[in-house]
Image (spheres, grey):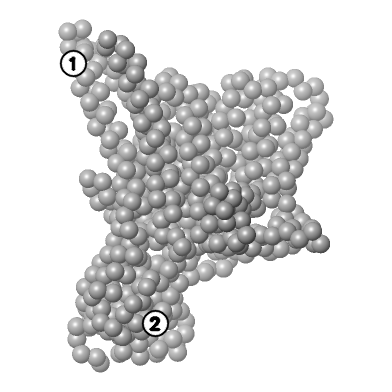
Amino acid sequence: MGKKINRLLVPLIWLITFGLLFYTRFVNLDWSLPLPMHPDERNMANAIQSLNCEISNLRECFNPHFYAYGQLPLYIGYVLVYIMKFFGKDLLNPVGFSEAAISLRIISAFASVITVFILMKIISLISKTKGKSLITFLILIFTPFAIQFAHFGTTESLLMLFYSTTIYLSLKYLVKSLDTKYFILNTSLILGLSLATKMSSAFFLVVPLTILLSKIKEKKIKLGSIIKVVGLLFIFTLLTLFFSFLFSPHNFIHYKDFLGSMRYEGDVAFGRYVAFYTRQFIGTTPLLFQLKYIFPYALGLPTFTLSLLGFFFLSWKDNKINLLRLAFFVYFFPNSFIFAKWTRFMAPIMPLMVIFAILFLEFLINNLKLLIKSKLTIRFLNLKFKVLNLLILIFVIIMITPGIAYLSIYKNFDVREIATDWINKNINKGSFVLSETANVVDIPISNTNNLNVVSFNFYEIDNDLNLYEELKNNLIRADYIFVPSRRVFTNHPKEIYPKLNQYYEDLFSGKLGFKKVAEISSFPKFLLTFKDEKAEETWTVFDHPVIRIYKRVSPRF
């Protein structure tokens, strides 16, 4: 009877776990809509809305006129919109922003789900558990970065999927589970799709090319002559470019517009042009910045710690683990040294870091079991194993807690909605409010009290004397001051922006005559509150910024 119960229980547990995976990626996927909380998602959704095709002008057919990203996610999103319209009997109306945004989020969520299964396959090629561990699956499910990126209609989830798949195919080829032709065809397709999503994924090419060259060098495949070797690499590159053109044709058709966009994106990324939204990176230290402000928050501190230990202390003689190290290095190293160090720039390698953490956890568990067996008699063995299993369970709960907590952001009201409710209930009608410009959405979202809100450009008060004088006049009039996020007061070095820093020091200290009356946040919560405002800016400002409200308490000067 007990065996029958176990046979039923195990599949049930796995079914529940699969349900958790889909739940974490799809729960409240329409959060914040129709407000455009994420600028990249907004730009991509607007591009989908602009897609059309006229027979008389085929060169412009489905040209998004947007080249920061490739056309692949835009086209998939466009198709999804019309599938939803078909079932909603709404085919005659134009594509709305919310429809476009939700289609992009569906792509991200599905890509995130598939990535988990690819990662399980990668682990199965390396791990003694063959990737069937429930613990492994739970850790992959509850990773904060995967949950966040699944809820953004951007390219990060797709890039994680494509890079993980490239690594999986490379591993299979390394262990002789794939023949050369199959490897080249499938890998070039995946790489073509990744380039059709975002051009920076060109780094992904290094891994399969290295594997091909190493196989050739070791003479494990018979290619005959150098001409055939060069031909093989040429075919691989040509196929990759072909698939890239197939799924993102306007990068080639309108190559001048595409190159112009790439030049601008390159200027921003490399710091040749310092935009207001990249000032947080002034004076930052490569490598250290990512280790301090990105990975501990995106992975959760326990998983991040294990990933570092796994990277350095797992076997250096295992070619499969070394391939993972190569895949990590070829993307992490060059992207760490560019000026713009956004969290999303590290997205493709975050699944790799989770794999290192899982492999190191397995390494610890296996060695502890061996130690127990060698030091204890049979009499105490079962008891010690039970204690060990309990400790493992506790540690795994600690590992997945940051991910569980991150779900609270999407299960609760958006922090800007909460702030709007507070404002409408507590601030008198017609009050003069000094706020900040360049936030993704201004507060209050609905101005029912007819507040006179000035969205002021604090970014330039050190560069524009007239603007600084205007700030003084606004301070005289202000009844309230809104600080909608950390974007301004934490991102400007004092030695370069002394006036700006002095303003915020005076505001926070009360010297300006204002007192903080509300601080509204939506930090990840589960048993604990994970205060992550010090993370790299984009980790918090799009889905859970901290909003501070100050009220005048002293006479006007």
Q: Which residue is mark 2?
A: 454
Residue 490 shown left or right of residue 506 in the figure: right
Name which residue type carries label 2.
Answer: Val
**Residue 293 location, x and y as percent?**
38, 53
Q: Earlier in the sequence, mark 2 or mark 1?
A: 1
**Residue 348 location, x and y as percent?**
52, 44
Which secondary structure, mark 1? Answer: helix
Nearest the eye: 275 or 552: 552
Residue displayed at 38% across by 71% down = 445
**Residue 442 location, x and y as percent?**
40, 72
Residue displayed at 28% across by 83% down = 429
Which quadrant is the N terminus positioned in? top left
Q: Quadrant of residue 310?
A: top left
In this rendering, which labeled residue sits more in front, label 2 or label 1? 2
Residue furthest top as drawn: 378
Q: Which residue is mark 1?
A: 383
Residue displayed at 80% across by 22% down = 224
